[in-house]
Image (cartoon, rainbow, N blue to C red):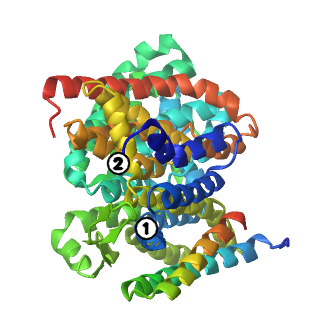
């Protein structure tokens, strides 16, 4: 279709629908996505030559694509629900404040490290829901508690939930993850010091920043190095868990130093170490099994033997746009991150069962918590993937990309890409959905402007990761846990400028990288 | 028509619809591969109906 202001606007209508419904009409993410899906179907059929066959094939493709993500999402949430049932989350959260009497380090441990660790394991609003109440119990205001915990794990979203967002970016763009990895790792590594600095200043003031800075620099250096090593070696499913675990370990060592230890709390819950370790066994198993499957190549190859993929035929729109026949990315069921979660869940459930950790009605409570969070997240993913695939098959996505690449200067586009990712995450409430919605647009824009596709996709991922924590959908979950229901607007006003700082830093880094290192594809 | 379901019943229904959606997707894939237009249209409609029933349940 010819690029005109009207055709561009029509192609952009599905995205505009989500924006207007969420911002002006305050609809939830799930219903807005469904409405956007209907608009996409109508616009694609009426203006972009969409046929029922294209719609049906798009839907089959999107459901197959969604399965990859939903298996991880459901597994991560089930693991969290199981851990919560046996009191693992409570024990972890009670243990951390007892490490040091230094208030800055306490806040950094909870708001920066524990939230990032939980994002690596579960995500989907869990980090703030768990950690904000702990900060409130330490004497912080509910609003500040939500702000600190939201910013603290904003870097970890991209590789959190076993890297489901990153996997979605790879799936929709078909760009190998290993190519995007160095850029993605660099942007998030650069964000560690600013994030820890912002948390310290907001919680304990500028004066304590000077005292805490050596600890911040040490922890950030360890986390950044771990992130770089893991992600650039293809272990992006551990890209949040690994650095945050190393950060927690470094923090533990730092709190042993006389300068930071202060007066240790005598009532430490770490006294019964055996019970503590047994309670957090789901997370220990997850990290252990995850590392084993990824690092032991023969085991990985053996588990990856059973794989499944679908063949899609060529489809042609009424306007003559050809989507060639293709084979879907294979799902390697037994080495899939979702299966790693399931192995951990099954083994730890057996241990908890034989040790008598499950109380009456445990299964009902676990499933109830799971359904509350998983159904909404799943439907959001399914409908947004549906929107994205229909738009791609009818040429709407490439038309938007052409419009953007013709309107924005080539040298400026790298700085714009994180903001586009941020917009998608804010609207859809998810880093994954933003990558699904804008990943192909960013890729096609980069190709049209002769920019490095992996660099631009890393910018998309960074912007989406930072902004996802301030999305209305996640803020609702976060605010509810600290008694701030219907006050999401106040929290958003505090969060927005701080997160814009982080997104702007990514934009500047993108611009400089493209300017000095060369941005050719 | 308004259904009054307790959380457990709602969960079971949602899981059942999810499972049905998965089965319908497999059959839709087969119908499309076989170029069976009528069946494809029916299954597409059912698939969409399932998604919307989950959203508004």
Q: Residues within 10 Å of mark 2 (few under 14, many from 20)?
A: many
How many numbered discs? 2
Q: For marks 1 and 2, give the one nearer the viewer.
A: 2
Q: Is residue A81 left or right of residue A75?
A: right
Q: Secondary structure at mark 1?
A: helix
Q: Is residue A200 left or right of residue A339?
A: right
Q: Residues within 10 Å of mark 1 (few under 14, many from 20)?
A: many
Q: Is residue B13 left or right of residue A402?
A: right
Residue to which mark 2 is pinned: A398
Give the quadrant of residue A353: bottom right
Q: The disc numbered 2 marks a residue on which chain?
A: A
Q: Is residue A256 visible?
A: no
Residue A480 position, x and y percent, is 71, 44
Residue A121 position, x and y percent, is 45, 55
Q: Which mark is residue A58?
A: 1
Query: A237 and A295: which one is in front?
Result: A237
């Amino acid at each position: 279709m010819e690029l005109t202001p009207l055709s561009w606007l029509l192609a952009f209508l599905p995205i505009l629908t989500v924006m207007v419904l969420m911002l002006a009409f305050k609809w939830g993410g799930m219903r807005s996505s469904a409405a956007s899906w209907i608009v996409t179907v109508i616009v694609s059929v009426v203006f972009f030559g969409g046929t029922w066959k294209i719609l049906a094939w798009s839907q089959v493709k999107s459901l197959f694509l969604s399965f990859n993500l939903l298996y991880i999402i459901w597994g991560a949430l089930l693991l969290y629900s199981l851990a919560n049932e046996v009191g693992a989350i409570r024990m972890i959260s009670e243990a951390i404040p007892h490490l040091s009497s230094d208030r800055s380090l306490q806040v950094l441990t909870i708001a920066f490290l524990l939230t990032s660790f939980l994002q690596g394991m579960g995500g989907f609003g869990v980090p703030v829901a768990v950690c904000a109440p702990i900060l409130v119990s330490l004497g912080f205001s509910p609003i500040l508690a939500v702000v600190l915990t939201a910013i603290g794990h904003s870097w970890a979203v991209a590789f959190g939930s076993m890297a489901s967002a990153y996997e979605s970016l790879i799936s929709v763009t078909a760009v190998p993850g290993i190519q995007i990895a160095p850029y993605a790792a660099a942007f998030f590594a650069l964000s560690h010091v600013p994030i820890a600095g912002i948390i310290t200043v907001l919680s304990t003031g500028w004066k304590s920043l000077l005292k805490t800075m050596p600890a911040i620099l040490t922890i950030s250096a360890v986390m950044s190095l771990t992130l770089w090593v893991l992600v650039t070696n293809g272990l992006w499913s551990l890209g949040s868990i690994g650095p945050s675990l190393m950060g927690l370990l470094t923090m533990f060592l730092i709190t042993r130093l006389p300068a930071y230890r202060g007066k240790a709390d005598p009532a430490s819950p770490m006294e019964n170490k055996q019970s503590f370790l047994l309670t957090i066994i789901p997370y220990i198993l997850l990290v252990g099994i995850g590392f084993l499957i990824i690092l032991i190549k023969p085991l990985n190859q053996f588990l990856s033997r059973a794989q499944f993929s679908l063949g899609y035929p060529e489809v042609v729109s009424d306007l003559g746009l050809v989507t060639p026949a293709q084979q879907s990315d294979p799902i390697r069921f037994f080495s899939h991150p979702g299966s790693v979660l399931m192995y951990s869940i099954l083994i730890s459930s057996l241990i908890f069962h034989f040790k008598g950790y499950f109380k009456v009605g445990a299964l009902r409570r676990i499933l109830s918590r799971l359904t509350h969070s998983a159904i909404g997240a799943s439907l959001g993913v399914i409908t947004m993937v549906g929107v994205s695939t229909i738009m791609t098959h009818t040429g709407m996505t490439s038309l938007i990309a052409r419009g953007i690449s013709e309107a924005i200067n080539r040298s400026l586009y790298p700085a714009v890409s994180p903001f586009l990712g941020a917009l998608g995450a804010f609207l859809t409430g998810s880093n994954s959905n933003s990558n699904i919605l804008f990943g192909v647009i960013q890729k096609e824009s980069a190709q049209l402007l002769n920019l490095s596709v992996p660099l631009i996709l890393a910018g998309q991922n960074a912007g989406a990761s930072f902004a996802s924590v301030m999305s209305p959908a996640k803020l609702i979950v976060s605010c509810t846990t600290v008694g701030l229901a219907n006050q999401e607007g106040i929290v958003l006003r505090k969060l927005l400028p701080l997160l814009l700082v982080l997104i702007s830093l990514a934009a500047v880094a993108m611009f400089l990288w493209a300017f000095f290192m060369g941005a050719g594809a | 028509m308004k259904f009054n379901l307790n959380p457990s019943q709602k969960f079971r229904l949602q899981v059942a619809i999810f499972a049905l959606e998965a089965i319908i997707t497999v059959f839709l894939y087969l119908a499309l591969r076989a170029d069976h237009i009528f069946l494809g249209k029916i299954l597409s409609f059912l698939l969409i109906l399932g998604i919307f029933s989950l959203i508004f349940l």
